Amino acid sequence: MSAIRLPQRGWLFDLDGTIYRGRDLIPGADATIAALRAGGRRVVFLSNKPLETRADYARKLTALGIPAGDDDVINSSLVLARHLATLDPGAPVFVIGEPPMVAELRAHGFEVRTDHHVRWVVIAFDRTFDYAKLNVALQAVRRSGARLIATNPDRTCPTEDGEIPDCAGMIAAVEAVTGRTVETIVGKPSPIILEVALAALGVGAADAVMVGDRIETDIVMGKRLGLATVLVLSGITAVGDPRIAEIGPDLVLRSVRELLTS
Amino acid sequence: MSAIRLPQRGWLFDLDGTIYRGRDLIPGADATIAALRAGGRRVVFLSNKPLETRADYARKLTALGIPAGDDDVINSSLVLARHLATLDPGAPVFVIGEPPMVAELRAHGFEVRTDHHVRWVVIAFDRTFDYAKLNVALQAVRRSGARLIATNPDRTCPTEDGEIPDCAGMIAAVEAVTGRTVETIVGKPSPIILEVALAALGVGAADAVMVGDRIETDIVMGKRLGLATVLVLSGITAVGDPRIAEIGPDLVLRSVRELLTS
């Protein structure tokens, strides 16, 4: 009979590199999540990617043997829409982003426009980014005094075929031409995505664990808010990384499988 | 009978804001250039914009009453091609830029490719910039170790309809996703464009004058290389700008018309 290594009630899991790698489940991730749930723990999955809907992630997890519904997934497009709804509900916005980002904003009551008559420019990872969008963003800032908010700060996104440009490219282009800095980036390592996740779980930071494979986002962010942190070496971080000792996660495991004692 | 206020043989003129404003000649610019030429001075026109060919600029100047040939115009696409030809002649390059930039590189013997198998990524002001180009630039740096060179550092470009995003947007996007800094930006205020212009005129810096409407590019760059400098207030700089006293151009004139004494 296996036991869970940590006592907290709320569990936040990064996805790529932690639960799966690309299309493949990390061995034992399904059993670990099942054991946590069976033990009465609450689980939520975090992603910085605004490219898929929460339903897409839920379907992928379910297909990999981890039954999940939309509400079990917190991604940066959801967090951006929820956060902006607290700042400026129903505002007219221009979106540098893909259809799931636009859909999330519409679902939260925002007026998504294609011209520069807006109060916000929302900048997301966007594989359809182009000069015309950059120009609307510039005009929105110059002519309408629009403010800037973004989903995630990642330079690149890993794919099956290698890394591709991520949201940092869109953010940098808009900042360079407008001369204005993005006010808020809601995704990891921002505390905003953690706060949304903790609210969804209904637990406080002291009763929660952040599990992920990236020191500079998952672990740094978790520690900053006072969560317990677990670094897994199944993703981007190598065993001998000197930052492990420096940042000091509570546990360092080969993979989530080791969250259970055997 | 009018005389020329300064004795130098070589004269470098900025274009927009100095010789013309959009489609309109600045009154007296034609007479000033004619008088300089009649007095045996050599004249060249400088532009940071890589969007038009030198022939386009020469035609525009000629139509405005200032007869000019291709060789009278030095723009950032020419300077980039000439400079890169000294660093890595005939190299395979990927271009973020418009057709005149590509044509200038081909005319200088470079192999312009559309994939990432290149030694350089050339970044220019590009109104057809998009995610696909950003991705090729990333792959060129990551997979081929490509180096980065750019035409001009301007945030925005003034047009009849207001300002539009300029090369700084493309540079920032590439730098953000690659994590690498552009090595060289050849356009103003880089000394490289001035050196190309002085070589074209066949005069040394001590025997040359830089005339322009922008303190932070035209005047700063001219002073840095030891040219005489003339600030004209017919463009972007306002009469009371505190930087005028700080930077100290040799002459401050309402327009190029006042280069001649009446």
Image (cartoon, coloured by chain):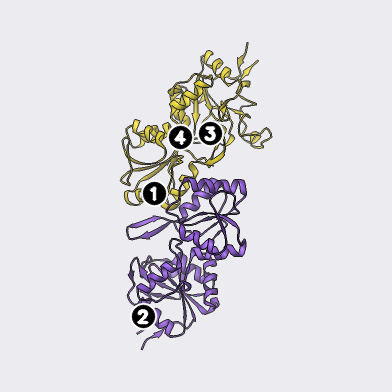
Chain colours: A purple, B yellow
Mark 4 or mark 1, which has the lower sequence index? 4
Residue for badge 1: B132
Amino acid residing under circle 3: Met
Q: Disc 4 and disc 1: Cα gap in Å?
A: 20 Å
Q: Which chain does the numbered disc 3 sit on?
A: B
Q: How far apart are marks 2 and 1 (CA)?
A: 40 Å
- Whole-number angstrom distance, CA of label 3 to CA of label 1: 35 Å
Q: Nearer the viewer, mark 4 or mark 3?
A: 4
Mark in front: 2 vs 3: 2
The chain holding disc 2 is A
Considering the numbered disc 1 on the image, is that residue within a helix, a strand or a loop? helix
The local secondary structure at tag 4 comes to loop
Q: Is residue B182 left or right of residue B13?
A: left
Q: Which residue lies furthest to the bottom in this view?
A: A1
Quarter of the image with the C terminus of chain B is top right
Q: Distance between the residues labelled 2 and 3?
A: 66 Å
Evaluate if marks 2 and 3 touch, with contact meaning CB atoms under 8 Å apart. no
Amino acid type for the residue under numbered disc 2 = Ala
Residue B98 to residue B54: above or below: below
Label 4 crowding class (10 Å Cα cut-off): few <14, some 14-19, many 20+? some
Q: Name the residue under label 3.
A: B221
Along the horizontal axis of the image, is A251 left or right of B19? left
Residue at 48% in and 38% down:
B152
Q: Mark 2 points at which residue?
A: A31
Report how far apart the C-alphas of labels 4 and 2 lie in the structure. Answer: 59 Å
